[in-house]
Image: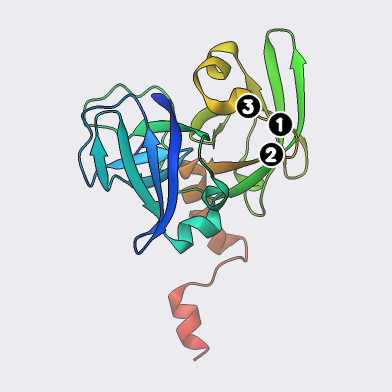
Amino acid sequence: MFTGLVEDVGTIEQVRVTPAGRELRVRCRYDDLTNGESIALNGACLTVREHGPRWFTVAAVTTTIERTTIGEWTNGQRVNLERAMEAGDRFGGHLVLGHVDGVATVVDIETQGDAQLVNLALPDGLSELMIPHGSLTVDGVSLTVNELPAADVVQLSLIEFTLSHTTLSDLRVGQHVHVEGDVIGKYVRRMLSPYQGGYQAPSALHAQD
């Protein structure tokens, strides 16, 4: 599990196809990683395969590539990094699983005072999890929903610290980003679905066999 508080911005040094999947070698500040631990790259939870002083490798399988932008990543690209939480860590963001729900598109960027307002067009099925001042993970960064300006559009307000310490300062209109909705909202939606006509209980399915 993660919190959405980016610890480092890494740089992809090498991309290659291996039997394990699309393998990425990433330059970072970490020098105490272990093989097999979880690390989030732009919000996608991957497993450290190999590591050394200030570098590590991960591999993305087909399912991950289909849900993310990892298939488009190239040498020199910057990525937000966060290692999985340890028991007893300070909890500063929100519950982030590192399971990307889909890819959103930047549709508008506007500077307003000391903040940068970013509008994202969300993938299908995610807008119903959005509430004003709720949580959303964008490329691994825990952010607060500022407004819901239109159907399937969410507005975020990025402060200077976030822009200075993550890759979100690189955002451009038309760019694709990873999004993960609040897991609490997902469970609430699942629990309510039997009462909204969107889910059939197992007993009802057996009755139709």
Which label sits on residue 48? none
User: Does 67 sit above or below residue 180?
Assistant: below
Q: Position of residue 37 (x, y in %)?
A: 25, 43
Q: CA distance from mark 3 to mark 1?
A: 6 Å
Q: Residue 37 vs residue 174: left or right?
A: left
Name the kind of residue labelled 2 in the image: Gln
Marker count (numbered):
3
Front residue (pair 26, 43): 26
Residue corresponding to mark 2: 175
Name the kind of residue labelled 3 in the image: Asp
Which label sits on residue 172? 1
SS assignment at label 2: loop
Among all residues in the image, which is located at the extreme top? 113
Residue corresponding to mark 3: 170
Name the kind of residue labelled 1 in the image: Arg
Q: Are marks 3 and 1 in contact (CB under 8 Å)?
A: yes
Q: Position of residue 193 (x, y in %)?
A: 56, 59
Quadrant the N terminus occupies: top left
At 35% from the left edge and 64% from the top edge, which residue is drawn?
19
Q: Position of residue 42 (x, y in %)?
A: 48, 37
Q: Earlier in the sequence, mark 2 or mark 3?
A: 3
Q: Position of residue 34 (x, y in %)?
A: 20, 39
Q: CA distance from mark 2 to mark 1?
A: 6 Å
User: Does 209 sit above or below residue 28?
Assistant: below
Q: Are marks 2 and 1 in contact (CB under 8 Å)?
A: yes
Q: Residues within 10 Å of mark 3 (few under 14, many from 20)?
A: few
